[in-house]
Amino acid sequence: MFFYIIVGTFLLDQTTKTVVQMLMYRGESIPVVPPVFYFTYIMNPGAAFGFLAYQTHVFIIVTVLLIAGMLLGYRKIPPDRVLLRSGMGMIVGGALGNLADRLRYGLVVDFLDLRVWPVFNVADTAIVIGAGFLIWEILMDTGKKGNKESEI
């Protein structure tokens, strides 16, 4: 399931970016649910909030290390930890989606615009949701360990 999530996330991200690039001009903004949600096509030179703009080589190295670490760590996760494995798959798939953009363009295609947050994409969404799953699993696991210790 882990690898299906990676591939599915990557394909969804790349497909949506391709559609945006085919149907929109860079800088164009299309209202979807005004004034809350727009499709706004931009090319992001950095990370979140434009952090470390044009440091493509740094992002590529960090992403490759993150993906390698996740793939190595995944093998140690018990099969019954579905949420943890799913979260890791979403993070890897999202990281691969943005890595593909950086390798191809030196920038990342972004298009989801909530107007109160920087423009983002499907890969970013998958990374955030995946990280949320990891945090949830860690907190739940810590809670279980805390309950066992108090019973002793």
Image (cartoon, rainbow, N blue to C red):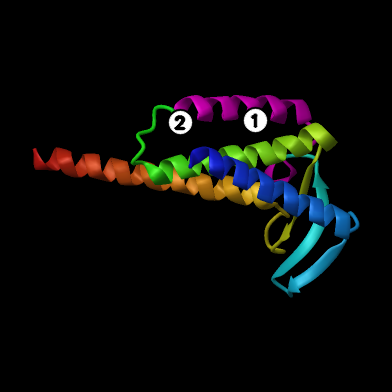
Say the numbered circle drawn on residue 74.
Answer: 2
Magenta range is 47-74
* 66 drawn magenta: yes
Q: Marks 1 and 2, Cα distance to the nearest angstrom?
A: 16 Å
* Residue at the extreme right of the image, as rendered: 25
Residue 110 visible from this viewpoint = no
Which residue is disc 1 drawn over?
63
User: Helix, strand, or loop for circle 1?
Assistant: helix
* Residue at the extreme bottom of the image, as rendered: 34
Q: Residue at x 69, y 71 (%)?
A: 36
Q: Image check: 7 left or right of 18?
A: left
Q: Residue at x 87, y 61 (%)?
A: 28
Q: Is residue 124 above or below residue 67?
A: below
Name the residue type under label 2.
Tyr
Q: Residue at x 73, y 74 (%)?
A: 35
Circle nearer the N terminus (1, 2): 1
Q: Quadrant of residue 152?
A: top left
User: Helix, strand, or loop for circle 2?
Assistant: helix
Name the residue type under label 1.
Thr
Q: Residue at x 53, y 26 (%)?
A: 69
